[in-house]
Amino acid sequence: MALTVRAFLKFILSAFAIGLGGMGASATEGDRHEVTTLSNLIGRLRSDAALRARFAGNPRGTLSEHGIDPSPYNLPDAMNAEQMGRLLAQNSPALAPNDEPPPAPQRPAAPAAVYGPPPRTPVQEPAPPVPQEKQPLRGIHTIIYGPPPGPRK
Amino acid sequence: MPHPPTYDGNPQQLARWRPEHDAPPSIAVWEITLRCDLGCCHCGSRAARARPDELSTTEALDLVRQFADLGLKEVTLIGGEFYMRDDWDRIAAEINRCGMLCSIVTGARQMTAERVSRAVAAGVGKISISIDGLERTHDAIRGSKGSWKAATAAARRISDSGIDLSVNTQMNRLTMPELPAVADMLVDIGARSWMVILTAAMGRAADHPSLLLQPYHLLYLFPLLADIKREKLDPNGIAFFPGNNVGYFGPLAETLRYGSELGHMWGGCGAGDSTLGIEADGRIKGCPSLPTSDYVRGNIRERPLREIAAELKREKTEAPTQLWGFCQSCRYAARCKGGCTWTSHVLFGRPGNNPFCHFRALTMAEAGLVERLEPVAVAPGKPFDFGHCRIVEAPFGPDIESDPLIGMTKLSQVFGLNAGAAGLWSKQELSNTLEYRQSDKT
């Protein structure tokens, strides 16, 4: 009998632990999904007129449909054109809505001292591995530069 | 003899306090102790314990008189946490007695009613409380659960006491989308001014590179700040003070930098020229944020303040910062002088090239480019230390606008956040962003 009770308690505790673990994993996954889709949703709104109309008519509902918790935001029941315009405005003059993708980047013709060599000052600490999220954008040519050699002030 | 204080209670007046070239500095920012009751993830001085040889009360009071003799108009007490030093109100009272404005910057974890009363009795004129976002975010950044509630309660106490209440906010990846909510709170708690500053890669912030903004985030941050100023601050008479690393000369500079109605525009780093920074053991530098190793020019235990201040002033004139990189060829180079010395020095080990510039980010974007910072060397783990970064140029493509931070910022910019919202970031996201990198341990 004692064994049975102990086994039962163990089962309850295991089930509880599994439940907690599952909740944790679910929350983590949900969070990642939420923040990713918020930026992506705004991107989709720029090109999808039907989605834009649905969002304007029911912003809370549309966010929820996309797995985004609307509760922290002070959203109206329906959006006006000015609000929609502000939300979809792109902050880069190089990326106006509906533009073609930007052309391949071009360096200034005469880089001069602006793009000096990496520092000659010996770096005392070993360079850590570049974190995954800091990796340069995939498939994109990057230009790297640092301060020019010279005495530290 | 000290100049009589000209502060009339209008925070905008402070913008007039920038001295002429031959004038002494107008403000000293004084770390009176490095001891602190918070463990902020962005703290440049890695404040925790007191320095082993902090100034005695007698030395501190003597330094106050030297400030007055030099002609300073304002002395700001900071830490660590100022009240962790028992004689803070004696120092504050002496500043007041000498005819200077005493202001205080505090995390306010334990800014009790009794301490507010002592501040009133000492004649403190202005207290700035640090509030970094909504409750969940603030508590995570400050490393202390309950610190947001404590800070906001203290803010109300200060506002009720008659001391001018200001709020200062770090702008980083976690706080940026929550800035509209902080602005709403300013109205609620009765703040008269708001200072915002970019979290720079110094001290503990250098240990948390994912907390820092990237230069291209300024493309989204500056319009957000302009909207907040126009919609929330100006109508409520709250003065907006962009920190010295918030600039420069972009299309919104005139709007943001004191509204330009006082003729004030960024005129280069004022370290040693208009400001002095004092470390708790008496070391003097031109700005409190500057790295100790490169910028301390003396200790008041060894030389009079006047002598050290003169040296700092002379250095500013005779050895101006050498510009390099983008800043060297910028059209505003002669006036801007590379922006904030501190911000660029802690990235590259020397000043003169500052990627945290709205004009620069816009110029790059017009060419279809963005700049990203990548850490290449870690900070050694001492107060006011820094690592080393490099700049990587990349195309301004869809990858940039899909950054989760940008979507959250845009939504909160347009609609604001609900009163009572605890934060936009989940506990897991906060934990991921503030994760301490083991490789940074020394």
Image (cartoon, grey):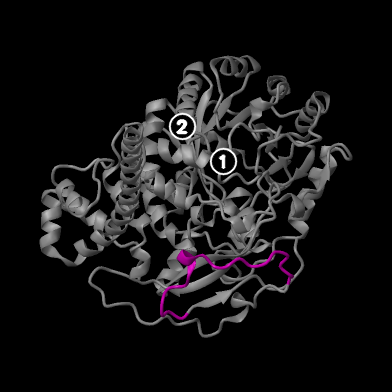
Label 1 marks a residue whose chain is B
Regarding residue A94, the answer to whether it shows in the image is yes
> Dot 2 lies on which element?
helix
> Dot 1 lies on which element?
loop
Task: Determine the residue located farthest toward the right in the rendered image.
Answer: B302
Bounds of the magenta segment: A121-141
Question: x%, y% of residue B400?
Answer: 38, 66
- Front residue (pair B322, A151): A151
Residue B79 is a magenta residue: no
Q: Which residue is located at x 20 percent, y 61 percent?
A: A45
- Front residue (pair B366, B404): B404
- Crowdedness near tag 1: few (<14), some (14–19) or many (≥20) residues, C-alpha within 10 Å: many
What's the amino acid at mark 2? Trp
Q: Is residue A132 above or below residue B84?
A: below
Q: Which residue is mark 1?
A: B40
Give the main secondary structure of the magenta stretch. loop
